[in-house]
Amino acid sequence: MKKLTKRKQSPNQLANLKKGKPFVKGDPRINYKGRASNFDQLRTFLQEMANEEIDDDGVKKTRLRMIAESLSENQLKDFLEFAYGKVPQPIDVKGQIESKVEIVNPNVKTDEL
């Protein structure tokens, strides 16, 4: 009688690419090269574009000022994060704990405490 064994799935099969599957050797989702160099080129281009001077009806402005005047707050935030990096968010770790924990033992009467 032949012994039935499970076939191993190739890491390139679509079943392994579903969300939640762990990485296996040779998995195409692994990024060995790190961040794409195109991002650095994009960042450099956005910084050059932001610092470019433009003559707007006799008033000299940087393109960044014109962009700030024309974009919404979220779009401007995204532009600045792409061009100059994300602003560090402060973390408050000195807060007060305002919750109470009451431990109740059903075997002990509250009158005995």
Image: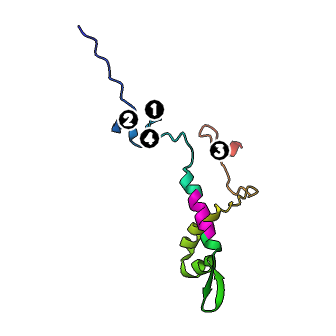
Magenta range is: 41-48
> Circle 2 sits on which residue?
12
In terms of depth relative to the viewer, which is nearer, 2 or 62? 62
x, y percent for residue 60: 66, 86
Query: Which numbered disc flags the more N-terminal residue, 3 or 4?
Result: 4
Query: Which numbered disc flags the more N-terminal residue, 1 or 3?
Result: 1
Q: Which mark is residue 103?
A: 3
Q: Is residue 79 above or below residue 61?
A: above
- Amino acid type for the residue under numbered disc 3: Ile
Is residue 47 shown in magenta?
A: yes
Q: Secondary structure at mark 1?
A: loop
Q: Residue furthest bottom?
A: 57
Is residue 28 shown in magenta?
A: no
As measured in the structure, the alpha-carbon distance from the residue carrying label 2 to the one carrying label 3 is 53 Å
- Amino acid type for the residue under numbered disc 4: Gly
x, y percent for residue 5: 31, 18
Q: How many other residues sit within 10 Å of disc 4, few (<14), some (14-19) or many (≥20)?
A: few
Query: Which numbered disc flags the more N-terminal residue, 4 or 1?
Result: 4
Q: Which mark is residue 26?
A: 1
Q: Secondary structure at mark 2?
A: loop
Q: Are marks 2 and 1 in contact (CB under 8 Å)?
A: yes
4 or 1: mark nearer the eye? 1
> Circle 4 sits on which residue?
20
Q: Quadrant of residue 43?
A: bottom right
